[in-house]
Amino acid sequence: MINGNAPSPRMPKVSRVASVEQLLPTAREMVSRTAATMYEGIEVKKGQKVLVVNDTTADQLVVQALATAILERGAHVDTITLEGFRGLTDAGEMVDSMFSSNWYPQWVWDAANQADIVLITAFLKAPHTPLPRLLNDPVVQNVEITADLMLSEYETFPVELRDTIDEVTWEKLFNCAEVKWTDLEGTDLTISLTAEDWKRAVESELKKTGSPYIHGHLMLPAPSTRMKGVWVISSVTFGGPVPGTTMFVENGKVVKVEGGGAFGDRLRESFARYGSLSQSTCPGPGVNWITTIGLCTNPKARRSPFFDDLEGSARVYAWTFGHRRSGVMHTSVGEGMVSSTYKVIRHMNTYFNTVVTDKGIVIENGHLTALDDPRVRQVALNYGDPDELLKETWIPAVSGVNAH
């Protein structure tokens, strides 16, 4: 049954990219701009050595465009292309074999030790599977994008406008004491937070990035032992769609999983297997703690409509890009290091959230309320029509919510 409160699905008309030449203007911008969180790219300077770590399942047009743009900057570029995970399309397996595992051979890192910049176009999440120590301390950037996404409105969305949206949203989050989070798929959670929770979270982020929050990806303090309720998902951030999965949360931990098909089985098995694992920063043992509660803020983020045609790294990127859209909640469970190269952690998305704090309504049925704020609209006027700039480009079709 369709939920009357849900907005209708929306996807802009997207053409397939046929040539590197179509991507070069964006690629040139990506290798010449100052890095901004949640935007691909980093400034490459003349004479620098750049290593691109690629695999056969990544979008090769993206790799070629970046390499061409880097050479045009007068830098040097070498590309390592590994086999990757050919034929891999299962969402749960993609997360546990690609996302959570440092699957690259050691000689890749030997090459990285000779580089000033390492661009990773193959799917590897360094924050979750720590890289070996690189003596030359290169700048490492993930490039999680497909060719059609390089040409999307997201890549040209003004950073000033994105940052203003973040500032307005942060006002309703920072130092809030109570959070009520529901979603039209069935999520119903409450979170109580203390001033100490916020102090610890903000100090950690300031130490890492120099900002109290990640631009484009604001977060509530987690884990929180005062989180309880029901969390319902059908999307794995770095994998794809899964059957509806219901998780019951008590004291910040998932204590029961219902449904989910093979993905649900994967959760249940790992929660039982690693119930005594203590290799994490969580308040207690186990890999069933809610460890990330993120809220994304860019209205122009979308998925690639070509997701179903892809495999491996490109398939991941085609899906995961959508979680950056304003109003999406991006949440993880687990973070236990099983070994030095493998971490048990799964990220999931909900799209039709309503989030209310004691400071106001942050999201309503998937719409980020900051997009309607007069301060945001005033900044948008500097770049064009606020109605167009602040309109969500994409609204996903979710079975039982806004699609049959």
Image (cartoon, rainbow, N blue to C red):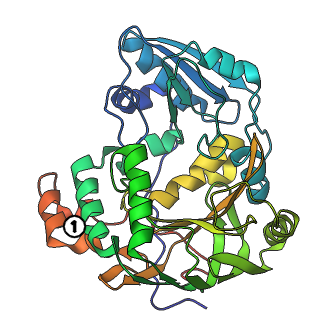
The quarter of the picture where residue 362 lies is bottom left
Q: Does 370 sit left or right of 354 as displayed? A: left
Residue 226: x and y in percent read: 55, 81
Q: Secondary structure at mark 1?
A: helix
Tell me what residue is drawn at x 64 percent, y 63 percent. Answer: 282
- Residue 352, position as x, y percentages in the image: 49, 78
Asked whether residue 69 is in view, the answer is: yes
Quarter holding the C terminus? bottom right
Residue in the picture at 64% in, 35% down? 122
Q: Is residue 378 above or below residue 172?
A: above
Where is mark 1, residue-wise?
387
Q: Quadrant of residue 256?
A: bottom right
Q: How many marks?
A: 1
Is the N terminus in the top left, top right, bottom left or bottom right quadrant? bottom right
When the figure is inspected, residue 351 is found, relative to residue 345, above or below; the finding is below
Q: Position of residue 377 (x, y in %)?
A: 16, 65
Q: Is residue 311 visible?
A: no
Which is nearer the eye, 305 or 265? 265
Q: Name which residue lies at 14% across and 71% down.
A: 374
| Neighbourhood count class around disc 1 (C-alpha, 10 Å): few under 14, some 14–19, many 20 upward | few
Q: Amino acid at mark 1?
A: Asp
- The answer to whether residue 366 is above or below residue 283 is below
x 76%, y 59%: residue: 92
Residue at the extreme front of the image, as rendered: 196
Across and down, in percent, residue 217 comes to: 42, 58
